Amino acid sequence: MGLPALSFLVNYKTYAGTTGDDALAFAETIERVRDETGSRFAVAPQLPDLRLVAERTALPIVAQAGAPRAESGMGDITLEAVADAGADAVFVSHPENEAAFTAVARAVDRCAELGLESIVAVESLPTARMALSADPDWLLFERSADIATEEGMVRTHPERIEAFVEAVADEAPGARTFVGGGVRTAEDVSRAFDCGVDATGAASAAVEADDREAWLRSIATAVPTDDDRR
């Protein structure tokens, strides 16, 4: 299935209230909003619940982390395990889970072998250009300082996102772009997609919303369709 373009990812990270039955209930709410609005959503459950959510919903599933089995040890989460559990894509790296470039390149290759879409995080155009040499499916443009704040690039520096999208399109037209960090409202989502990205998402804003379903329905109004991009 993969992570569809023009989609919004709800990332549970490690927040309370997003494990076990709660994880599934939240995912079912996301799926219901997706089905009733026609907007594209995906979910990144906590890793112990990945199989549960994958088997009980039809949402695209993103694993929060993973590394090749050949490079893993006790306690690590392997790409092979998340693929077997039903993941469609995986964060090979993230501002909260950084990895050396050589390790990223090997992980991207292993993802391709397993049929997983790879998501690689970068914080600048120079690191984006380095990451593109590994041929990932997705580049996530996110600064660690923006996470769980109200001062993300979508609000403070949208021109940087536009430059990132243009650079990726010029150097690797097959790679898709994702922006995160500080995305909290439907207006933020609109700003992100107006910059040309293929996907955006949120964690804290989604999980901590007083009414999660109402928040999701608000976000759905800002997720474009294929026709909007034509």
Image: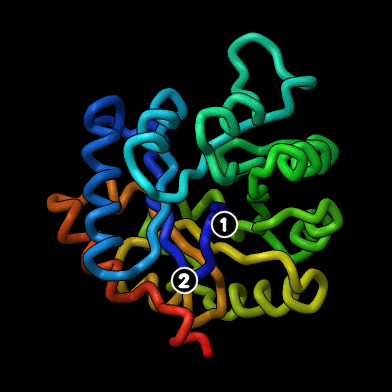
Q: Residues within 10 Å of mark 1 (few under 14, many from 20)?
A: many
Q: Is mark 1 on a helix, strand or loop?
A: loop
Q: Could you tell which of marks 1 and 2 lies nearer the N-terminus?
A: 1
Q: Along the horizontal axis of the image, is 109 left or right of 87?
A: right
Question: In terms of depth relative to the viewer, which is nearer, 93 or 33?
Answer: 33
Question: In terms of depth relative to the viewer, which is nearer, 45 or 32?
Answer: 32
Q: Mark 1 points at which residue?
A: 142
Q: What element carries label 2?
A: helix
Q: Where is residue 111 in the image (x, y as percent from the top left)?
A: 71, 41
In the image, residue 193 sits, relative to residue 45, either above or below, namely: below
**Residue at x 44%, y 87% (from the top left corner):** 228
Q: Position of residue 52 (x, y in %)?
A: 37, 29
Q: Distance between the residues labelled 1 and 2?
A: 10 Å
In the image, residue 59 sits, relative to residue 54, either above or below, namely: below
Q: Along the horizontal axis of the image, is 154 left or right of 10?
A: right
Question: In terms of depth relative to the viewer, which is nearer, 130 or 92?
Answer: 92
**Residue at x 39%, y 71% (from the top left corner):** 189
* Cβ atoms under marks 1 and 2 closer than 8 Å: no
Q: How crowded is mark 2: few (under 14 residues within 10 Å), some or many (20 or more)?
A: many
> From this viewpoint, which residue is outermost toward the top?
74
**Residue at x 15%, y 60% (from the top left corner):** 214
Q: Where is residue 70 in the image (x, y as percent from the top left)?
A: 79, 20
Q: Mark 2 points at which residue?
A: 154
Q: How many marks?
A: 2
Q: Where is residue 27 in the image (x, y as percent from the top left)?
A: 29, 44
Tell me the number on the disc at residue 101: none
Q: Disc 2 residue type?
A: Val
In the image, residue 96 sits, relative to residue 74, either above or below, namely: below
> From this viewpoint, which residue is outermost toward the bottom?
230
Q: Disc 1 residue type?
A: Glu
